[in-house]
Amino acid sequence: MLTVHVWADGDLPAGCSRSFSLNSYTDQGATWTTSGTQSLFDHDSVTINAGHKSGTLTVNKPLCYGQTDFYWGHHPLRRCRWRAASLSQLQCPSAADRLVQRR
């Protein structure tokens, strides 16, 4: 598992909030040419505000090859991936990509 802690460094004005997300993705290989298609593996998000100035995000790490992204916002990011040997075709996961449930 991978855990990230976020907090407000100072006071947030009333009515102001910030959302953060952490995603992990699986790959099919160790190098750019063998990595194949990237798929969403796990997602977590947290919102901080004047009354809740910190939070913790935790995602499962892929078993072998993968990537982790930390970003502003709540929704899982769709990752577009160049297919291994061909830079002429951009492959994006469909909305049907499934999120692996935490164990």
Image (spheres, rainbow, N blue to C red):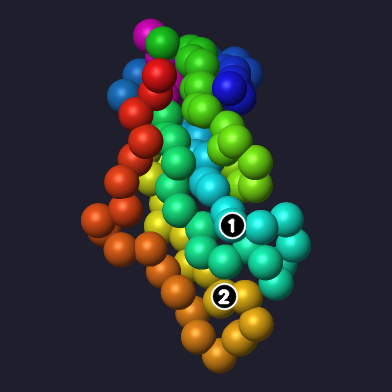
Where's the C terminus, which quadrant?
top left
Q: Is residue 48 magenta?
A: yes
Q: Is residue 74 left or right of residue 81?
A: left
Q: Residue at x 60, y 42 (%)?
A: 68
Q: The residue under label 1 is which amino acid type?
A: Gln
Give the number of the disc on residue 28: 1
Where's the N terminus, which quadrant?
top right
Q: The residue under label 2 is which amino acid type?
A: Trp
Q: Residue at x 57, y 75 (%)?
A: 82
Question: Element at badge 2?
Answer: strand
- Residue at far top of view: 51
Q: Nearer the viewer, residue 75 or 72?
A: 75
Give the class, few, some or many, for how many residues have Cα within 10 Å of label 1's Cα (few <14, many ≥20). some
Residue 72 sits above or below residue 80 on the image? above
How many angstroms separate mark 2 from mark 1 (CA)? 13 Å
Give the number of the disc on residue 82: 2
Q: Is residue 99 left or right of residue 7?
A: left
Count of all numbered marks drawn on residues in the image: 2
Q: Nearer the viewer, residue 23 or 45?
A: 23
- Would you identify the image quadrant in which residue 50 lies? top left
Mark 2 or 1: in front is: 1
Q: Nearer the viewer, residue 79 or 16?
A: 79
Q: Is residue 90 magenta?
A: no
Q: Residue at x 41, y 69 (%)?
A: 92
Q: Position of residue 84 (x, y in %)?
A: 62, 75
- Residue at far right of view: 31
The magenta-colored residue range is 46-51
